[in-house]
Amino acid sequence: MTQGSQTFSTGSPLAAPGQPASSSTTIALRRALGRDWLTAWIFLAPCMIVIIGLIAYPFFSAILLSFQAKLVGSPATWVGLANYQELLFGRDVGGVFRQSVVVSILFVTAAQGMKLFLGFGMALLLNENFPYRMLVRGIFFIPWAVPTLIAGLTWKWMYDGTQVGLLNMLALRLGLTSDLIQWLGNYNMALWSVTVAVVWASTPFWSMMLLAGLQAIPSEQYEAAEIDGADVFQRFWMITLPGVMNVLIITFMLSTIWTANSINFVYVLTGGGPANATMIFPLLAYQIGVAGAQRLGMGATISLFFFPVFLVMIYFLTKRMLAEEEK
């Protein structure tokens, strides 16, 4: 008799006398799922099928594809780490990739900094009592509800480099400039123009999250601080900031992952140009793997290159969110 069957027959609460011996894996699953382990499997099966079909299979297929040279419509060839070596040390794709890394870091850092500053300011403002507060809150949150394609096309019209563009039209009529400004066509301005559009669309999410955190802080804490003589800055530093710190960290990590992986605004406004000035790495992966060269293996390699960074962020994000639920 195996060790697993000995344990099963000599004390396991799930075992019945005379029941055939089971494997240690089955016994462990029964203990994890409880007495109704078979019913639990039935309810878990649809969820597991979805996870395996929509998450696990594409993910592991992408990993396998990153070690292959495969063009669309052609058989794949195993090349090992050649795709990764080309990204790190190559001249053509590798040069654009290394430039996209710098652009992505600048893009995410600038966008996150602006969203933090504006989102926190909006949340503090919307948390105050003033007439028509609910109406103002609704207006502030409109950008979050606008479809990305519509918002992108609107910003593209505003940034148009001719007199038709809204910003150029206003600048000319107000006498701020005598020349047309190429908001999206200038190498030094394109990335910041795209960043402003992304910040406009995403800041309401920060405000909603932080506003919920602010409203969870008991007003008695502020009243007690005022009685003790604390000024506005001291109340913010000692009460407000610690009160929303967990929400702030979760929002920051979520927004960082979304911003780093989002190509919508960049694709609509500039397509990565001019001269790759706005080429962030997810857009490069799309253009190399699907739209342009159709090198599926290289596209998968670019997509997976930063996965370890996101994996660490997802781990700490999940850990923080689970800790919040247990409070």
Image: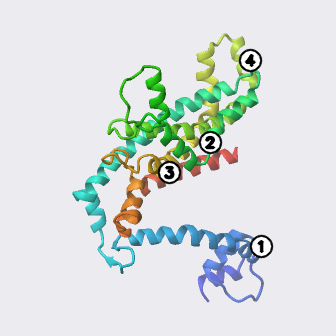
Type of amino acid under label 3? Asn
How far apart marks 4 and 3 lie (CA) works out to 45 Å
Question: What crowding class fits label 1: few (fewer than 14 Cα within 10 Å), some (14-19), or many (20 or more)?
Answer: few
Q: Which residue is labeled 3 in the image?
A: 264
> N-terminal of the two: label 4 or label 1?
1
Query: Is label 4 or label 1 in front?
Result: 4
**Which residue in the structure is indicated by mark 4?**
223
The amino acid marked with disc number 2 is Trp
Residue 195 is marked as none
Q: Quadrant of residue 297?
A: bottom left
Q: Residues within 10 Å of mark 3 (few under 14, many from 20)?
A: some
Mark 1 vs mark 2: which is more N-terminal? Answer: 1
Task: Tell me which label, 2 or 3, sits earlier in the chain.
Answer: 2
Q: Earlier in the sequence, mark 4 or mark 3?
A: 4
Q: Are marks 1 and 3 in contact (CB under 8 Å)?
A: no
Q: Amino acid at mark 1?
A: Arg
**Earlier residue among tags 1 and 3:** 1
Q: CA distance from mark 1 to mark 2?
A: 46 Å
Q: Tell me the kind of residue under disc 4.
A: Glu
CA–CA distance in space, label 1 to label 3: 48 Å
Graded by Cα atoms within 10 Å as few (under 14), some (14 to 19) or many (20 or more), the crowding at tag 4 reads: few
Whole-percent x, y for residue 272 in the image: 38, 49
SS of the residue under disc 3? helix
